[in-house]
Amino acid sequence: MIYQYEPKGVCSMQMNIEVEDEIIKNVEIIGGCAGNTQGVSALVKGMNINEAIKRLKGIDCRGRGTSCPDQLAIALERIKEQIA
């Protein structure tokens, strides 16, 4: 299933996340720093939701208190709540 998330406090505007059986199949991040968001998307592809959350949660971007990776972790937490 593909989930949409609107990140808060970062440059990216939308995250489309495909998850199947708690495995991340694909992540598309619209907006933000293209190289970084494509890199993060490639790195989490095939990863278990829990592992991705553990690795990404709390990463800060320029003192904002969040980042695109942190927002992805928050989106994944919300997806976990929906599929539980």
Image: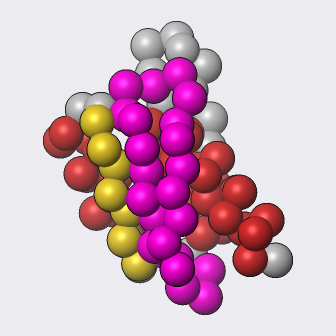
Numbered circles on residues, count: 0
Q: Which residues are magenta?
A: 1-24
Q: Position of residue 25 (x, y in %)?
A: 41, 78
* Most foreground residue, 54 or 70: 70
Q: Is residue 46 above or below residue 55?
A: below
Figure quadrant of residue 26? bottom left
Task: Describe residue 14's horizontal placement relative to residue 51 as left or right.
Answer: left
- Of all residues, the one furthest to the bottom in this rendering is 21
Residue 21 counted in the magenta span: yes
Outermost top residue: 63
Residue 72 against residue 84 in the figure, above or below: above
Residue shown at the point (54%, 85%) measured from the top left:
20
Classified by dominant secondary structure, the portion drawn in magenta counts as: strand
Q: Is residue 67 left or right of residue 21?
A: left
The quadrant in which residue 83 appears is: bottom right
Render colour scheme: secondary structure
Q: Position of residue 32 (x, y in %)?
A: 30, 32
In the image, 6 versus 68, the foreground residue is 6
Q: Is residue 23 left or right of residue 30?
A: right
Q: Is residue 57 above or below residue 52?
A: above
Q: Position of residue 41 (x, y in %)?
A: 33, 58
Answer whether residue 66 is magenta in the image: no
Which residue is drawn at the image coordinates 48% and 30% (left, top)? 67
Residue in the image at 76% along x and 69% along y: 82
Q: Is residue 49 visible?
A: yes
Does the image show residue 56?
no
Q: Which residue is depicted at the point 48% across and 72% down?
A: 2
Relative placement, left or right, of 79 versus 23 is: right
Q: Quadrant of the C terminus?
A: bottom right
Q: Is residue 17 above or below residue 12?
A: below
